[in-house]
Image (cartoon, grey):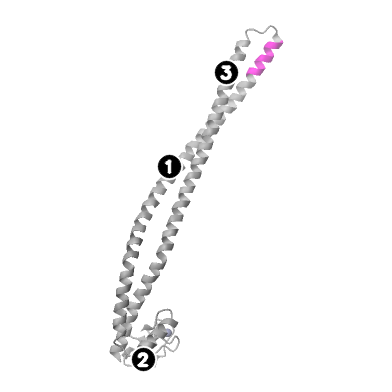
Amino acid sequence: MERELETLFEAQKIETLIMEDERKLLRAPQRLKQMDEELLAVRQKIEKEKEIIDELEKERRKKEKELEVEKEKIKKLEVRLYDVKTNKEYQALLKEIEAAKETNDRTEEDVLVLMEKVEDLKKDYESSHVHLKEIERQSEGERAVIEKEMKSMDEVIARLTQERDNLLSVVSENLRNMYRILKEGRGGIAVTNVKNGVCLGCNMNIPPQLFIEVTKNKQLIQCPSCNRILFFREND
Ligand SMILES: [Zn+2]
């Protein structure tokens, strides 16, 4: 019985590896999709930043144009100062020039504010680009690893399955059936180790007398709580 139990225990270890690989295989497409989404989000953020910069630049150019037009107007008004006949007209013209200059001052301020804003936004935009390059590089690396893993995983699983089946083929049919039924009903774990009087399958205590029997590995003993087949191996 000890040989058979040990064989089952080894088969279970391989079974666990198979389950891990299958989980990885299932997770891989999700992870790849997640990476694509992350990249897309960063790219969209950068596009948005660029749009805002372009818009502010457009606004600045518009203001600069206004400024030029207004300066031309002031020049013309100033020329007219020489032609006015009355003091009243002269005063009115001066007032108009003054008002135009004030408007220009404000527009100039607006231009400066816009330039500063664009300057700041460009810094953000640059660092977003650096960040994008960084995560592009990372996900390229991760993608390569995942794709390589996925390719070899099928082979690995097939090899492990063969190894498991070889082991199971040498135990009695009775035990093999029991293993299969428990595996299906207990999340893939039919055989489990025990440690300090605890079943490592369900983490419940095993009665001390039973635990002593389990450590001998001489007979088929199932956990009173989870029904799994118990096998004792120290430091495993
Ligand atoms: Zn248990």
- Front of the two marks 1 and 2: 2
Amino acid under label 3?
Glu
Prevalent SS, magenta region: helix
Residue extent of the magenta highlight? 88-97
First in sequence: mark 2 vs mark 3: 3
| Residue at image coords 46%, 39% | 122
Pointer 2 residue? 174
How far apart are labels 1 and 2 at the CA level?
A: 68 Å
How far apart are labels 3 and 1 at the CA level?
A: 38 Å
Marker count (numbered): 3
| Residue 147 position within the rendered picture, expressed as x and y whole percent measured from the top left | 35, 61
Pointer 3 residue? 72
Secondary element under disc 3, as helix, strand or loop, is: helix
Pointer 1 residue? 126
Front-most of residues 126 and 23 = 23
Q: Quadrant of residue 105?
A: top right
Amino acid under label 1?
Glu
Q: Is residue 91 magenta?
A: yes
First in sequence: mark 3 vs mark 1: 3
